[in-house]
Amino acid sequence: MKARIFLIPVLLTVFSIVVIVLALQLDKSPPIIVGKSMQPRAFPIFLMVINLLLVVLLTLQFLRSPPEAIPLEPFATWGSMLLMVLFYLITTYVDMFIAIAVVVFLMCFLWGERRWWVALLTAVVTPASIFLLFDSVLRIRFPRGLFTNWWYS
């Protein structure tokens, strides 16, 4: 049996333990804030305990019937992951709505759209719709950026 099939359960276990340790570092909230409800740190610990139980089940499944090798994901999948990194960078340093437009435009081509005007229309309408819905209808303000600074001033 190949040991590499246990890489995912080991990584999930390490992740869960790290989250539990970090959650235990959180200060307890005073009773006046939380009352008789659970402490804020209890929820991530609860989720990670469930995660660890699921990791045990996954490991048992791997022991009973090891998974077969699967082919690598297509480039569109890996490209989408790279676009999420680009989205983070543009959101952090420029503006979230500009990031949505750029990533949607590029993702259209990545997943097979060949008409540039459809990609451009999608890239403009999607963030505009999101912004107008949340800003005008729901009255939710967005973090400041290049576009939002211009809009809110």
Image (cartoon, helix red, strand yellow):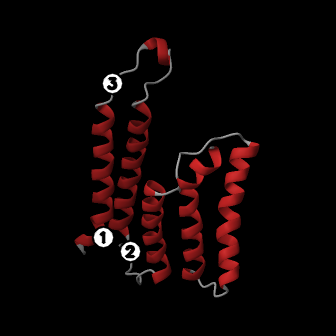
Q: What's the CA distance linking mark 2 and mark 1?
A: 8 Å
Q: Vertically, is 12 above or below 112?
A: above
- Number of dots carrying numbers: 3
In the displayed structure, 9 sits above or below 122; it is above
Is residue 66 rendered to the left or right of residue 143? left
Residue closest to the far bottom: 114
Quarter occupied by residue 17: top left
Residue occupied by mark 2: 67
Q: Secondary structure at mark 3?
A: loop
**Residue sitting at x 33%, y 35%:** 23
Kind of residue indicated by mark 1:
Ile
> Where residue 128 sits: x, y (%)?
69, 59
Which of the two discs, 3 and 1, sits closer to the camera? Answer: 3
Quadrant for residue 69, please give it.
bottom left
The residue labelled by disc 1 is: 5
Position of the C terminus, as image quadrant, is: top right
Q: For the residue marked with disc 2, what is the amino acid?
A: Pro
Q: Position of residue 98 (x, y in %)?
A: 56, 62
Q: Earlier in the sequence, mark 3 or mark 2?
A: 3
40 or 81: nearer the eye?
A: 81
Which residue occupies 43% across, 76% down?
A: 78
Q: In the picture shown, does residue 46 fall above or below 110?
A: above
Residue 74 visible in the displayed image: no
Residue designated by label 3: 27
